[in-house]
Image (tube, helix red, strand yellow):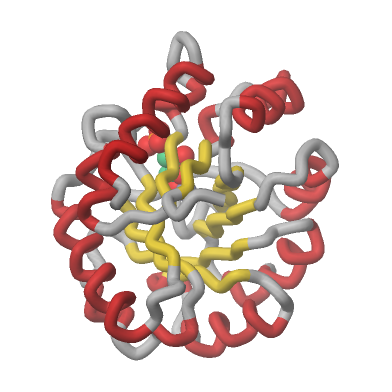
Amino acid sequence: MPSVKLAPSLLSADFADIAGQIKMVEAAGANALHLDSMDGRFVPNFTWGPKIVADLRKLTTLPFDCHLMIVEPEKYVDAFREAGADIITFHYEATPHAHRLLQHLRKIGARAGIGINPQTPTAMLVDLIEECDQILVMSVNPGFGGQAFIERALVKLREVRALVAARNPDCDIEVDGGIGTTNIERAVEAGATMLIAGSSVFGAADPPAAMREMRRRIDSVVK
Ligand code: DX5
Ligand code: ZN
């Protein structure tokens, strides 16, 4: 596994041919698959729950990076873990008990991730950082693919990198939203170690070529 990972987001994939889409990105060098669960409450959109994750689990051995954009995530994390989630990321804004939930995620054998919306300062992670295996910096407002990258996320990635370097160097730093060839190097230079790409992969004319180009750009700036 490379130190900086590229994970396509299935949100922008064609679910009428999901097996083919997964095979395609796996062959093109995806390091994980990013699965966005949305409940129509935390975000104004719906996607899928544990049943679909369990079905997709049969199609690949790639790690599943499950991004829960749902309220009361503590009620559902066990079901996502049982469905085959390897990394489970919930939102800081979605629960009053983030610390407890991070500890629980590790207890059930998942990598424990927490995400912050564009409105949330990185300072909110200060008392949680040792409990995290992954921090997700949202670079769009969650809910939809294909939105413009919010440049302020680069400042937040640098802040998270400083926190991680000082207190939890094995923690991955994920950036999600609007990532593509125009900003991927800058995101890596700012500290991202896991790049999520939805529309820039599945919306490309040639998705494998788009992934190879993103990988080339990542490798050009990884020290
Ligand atoms: C948005 C999701 C993202 C989404 C990113 O709420 O969390 O994972 O798929 O899509 P793009 O890469 O198109 O911005
Ligand atoms: Zn996501």
Residue at the spot 56% in from the left edge and 46% down from the top edge: 34
Camera-side residue of 62 and 84:
62
Q: Is residue 164 visible?
A: yes
Placement of 190 over or under 76, stated as above or below: above
Picture coordinates of residue 160 (x, y %)? 27, 70
Tag count: 0
- Residue lying furthest top in this view? 205
Q: Is residue 144 visible?
A: no
Residue at the spot 51% in from the left edge and 42% down from the top edge: 7
Placement of 134 over or under 177, stated as above or below: below
Picture coordinates of residue 56 (x, y %)? 77, 41
Q: Is residue 19 left or right of residue 172?
A: right
Q: Is residue 155 left or right of residue 149?
A: left
Camera-side residue of 33 and 16:
33
Residue at the spot 59% in from the left edge and 51% down from the top edge: 37
Q: Is residue 222 left or right of residue 9?
A: left
Picture coordinates of residue 166 (x, y %)? 28, 83
Picture coordinates of residue 195 (x, y %)? 41, 46
